[in-house]
Amino acid sequence: MPTSFDLSWSALFKPGVATDYFNIDYPPVELQASGYSKNNALWLAELSRLIYRKRGNIDNKSPPGQPSRLEILNTVGLQETYFFTSRSTYAAILEPFNHSFAVLVFRGSAQLRDWLYNFNSIPAAWSVGGKVHWGFQQALVTIWPEIEKSLSQLTVPVFYTGHSLGAALATLAASLKPPHALYTFGSPRVGNFEFADTIKPVKTYRVVNHRDLVTRVPPSRLFADFCHLGELYYMTTGNQILVNPTAPVLANQTDSQEITETTLSSKSTKKGFYLPEFLTDHAPVNYVARLERNWLQI
């Protein structure tokens, strides 16, 4: 069974408390894909969700009877070879046991201080070119030397990914050290047009779940003409993916109809209180749920 949609408060603000991951048989990662890969998007979205979960043996133990992030990774043939943390940033490098590729995944907003960084949207000069969101810049520069040192030891293709704040940090990292490909989920705008030019050589796939509000901030005209970059892969409520849809097409998208109490997780159903769609569409679990249904064609 594919992952259930979850409209609860905790799905958005406490994604690390989830207990179910990799709910379908995930297809092989496609290293030779010349463009967007459904297989790769599935894996990277789930890893961007899993990074919110406690590691298990360093940053507090998992709840009794529940597997840690490291244990969950092991069940699907992955291991965490590098781990990075600072006051405002949390990331890891994951690799399969055969070391055929690697994934640099950044965690999104999980604590109040992370959200405060999200609001520090004053434009700041970026070392590679252009201007970027000051809060995102500060969140990355505190830990980038350590990450870059670890990346330099890898000789395999490396994917960068993340959800929300994690997507923004992955984008900044891609401008400093280009990856094999960049997949972002629920990414806000990171920088201006000049900054976007620094990412053009990178294969960049920006996945947006329907009405996700975070993908519309910061407002482009108010903050140094901040813009989105890469190819847009827009997920509809019918679990279809539209590639670079026009504004009129987006405006005609209808609200969700298939998210009913029969498809909600038991946790959200019991709570009886659901957030509006522009917020629930940002929850990492709902990105995974829709991508899985798109891959299964249901």
Image (spheres, helix red, strand yellow):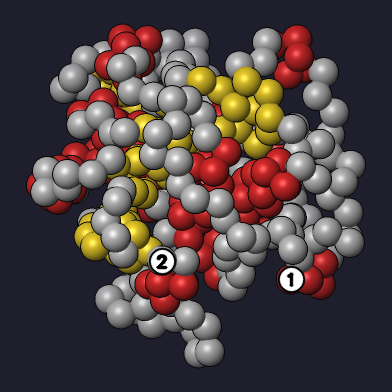
Q: Is residue 295 above or below residue 2?
A: above
Q: Is residue 232 above or below residue 157?
A: above
- Give x and y (percent) for residue 106: 36, 49
Mark linked to residue 217: none
- Mark 1 surroundings: few (<14), some (14-19) or many (≥20) residues within 10 A: some
- Give x and y (percent) for residue 7: 74, 55
Badge 2 amino acid: Gly
Quarter that holds the C terminus: top right
Q: Residue at x 49, y 10 (%)?
A: 221
Task: Find disc 1 in the rendering and name its residue.
Answer: 267
Element on which disc 2 rests = loop
Res 14 visible: no
Task: Find disc 2 in the rendering and name its residue.
Answer: 77
- Give x and y (percent) for residue 190: 39, 26
- Mark 2 surroundings: few (<14), some (14-19) or many (≥20) residues within 10 A: few
Q: Is residue 205 above or below residue 151?
A: above
Element on which disc 1 rests = helix
Q: Residue at x 31, y 73 (%)?
A: 59
For marks 1 and 2 on the same chain, the one whose residue lies earlier in the sequence: 2
Q: Is residue 6 above or below residue 161?
A: below
Instruction: Please name whichever residue, 72 or 140, is drawn nearer the observer in this view of the structure.
Output: 72
Instruction: Please name whichever residue, 222 or 20, is drawn nearer the observer in this view of the structure.
Output: 20
Please name which of the two marks, 1 or 2, marks the residue nearer to the observer: 2
